[in-house]
Image (cartoon, grey):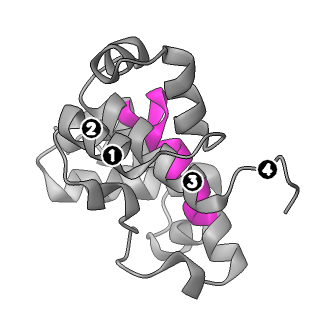
Amino acid sequence: MNKKDPNPIDAFVGSRVRMRRLMIGLSQEKLADGLGITFQQVQKYEKGTNRIGASRLQAIADILGVHPSFFFQQDEGSAQSGKPAADVHESQEISSFVASKEGIALNRAFLKITDPVLRKKIISLVAAMAQTPEADQAPAQSGTRHAESLHG
């Protein structure tokens, strides 16, 4: 690891701060105001460039309405150090996407879909478009039939 590279744990915690901030619709400026710091400092925290001290992390948790442990939670409850490097990279990519504006918007919209069958069909459609292994698990359909089947 290069001396200038952020520590992976600091980057993970920062990504969780960003994800939660975006989930509740809070700007970096508003978070910074609540902490008594500049929004540039919040940016550095979110990128993992600067470490977040314990008291500052508690203050961030209070503002964002979560327990401090939220910033350390893994997707599957396992320690990051116990995962193979490829899994850690994929987990970081997923965290980055989920914390992005597009990821938040997509998740919010998807959560409003209450029909579980329609949810599975959307996942199959996206997987087929991305040509992922999940697409192989879906029944083969033509593009037209697939699009029509989403509506009923």
- Marks 2 and 3, how far apart at CA: 17 Å
Q: Amino acid at mark 3?
A: Asp
**CB-based contact (under 8 Å), mark 3 and mark 4:** no
Q: Amino acid at mark 4?
A: Asp
- Front-lying residue, 151 or 71: 71
User: Does residue 98 show up magenta in the picture?
Assistant: yes
- Residue 64 position by quadrant: top left
Observer-side mark, 2 or 1, equals 1
What residue is shown with label 4? Answer: 5
**CB-based contact (under 8 Å), mark 3 and mark 1:** no
- Residue at 49% x, 14% y is 38
**CB-based contact (under 8 Å), mark 2 and mark 1:** yes
Observer-side mark, 2 or 3, equals 2
What residue is shown with label 1? Answer: 55
- Marks 3 and 4, how far apart at CA: 10 Å
- In this picture, is 143 found above or below 1? above
Q: Amino acid at mark 2?
A: Ala
Among numbered discs 4 and 1, the one appearing first in the sequence:
4
- Residue at 45% x, 39% y is 99
Number of marks in picture: 4
What crowding class fits label 1: few (fewer than 14 Cα within 10 Å), some (14-19), or many (20 or more)? few
- Residue 63 image point, x, y percent: 21, 32
Q: Amino acid at mark 1?
A: Ser
SS at mark 2? helix
What crowding class fits label 2: few (fewer than 14 Cα within 10 Å), some (14-19), or many (20 or more)? some
Name the side, left or right, on which 110 lies relative to 145. left
What crowding class fits label 3: few (fewer than 14 Cα within 10 Å), some (14-19), or many (20 or more)? many
What residue is shown with label 3? Answer: 10
Image: magenta residue range? 90-104
- Residue 88 image point, x, y percent: 62, 71
SS at mark 1? helix
Q: Which mark is residue 59?
A: 2
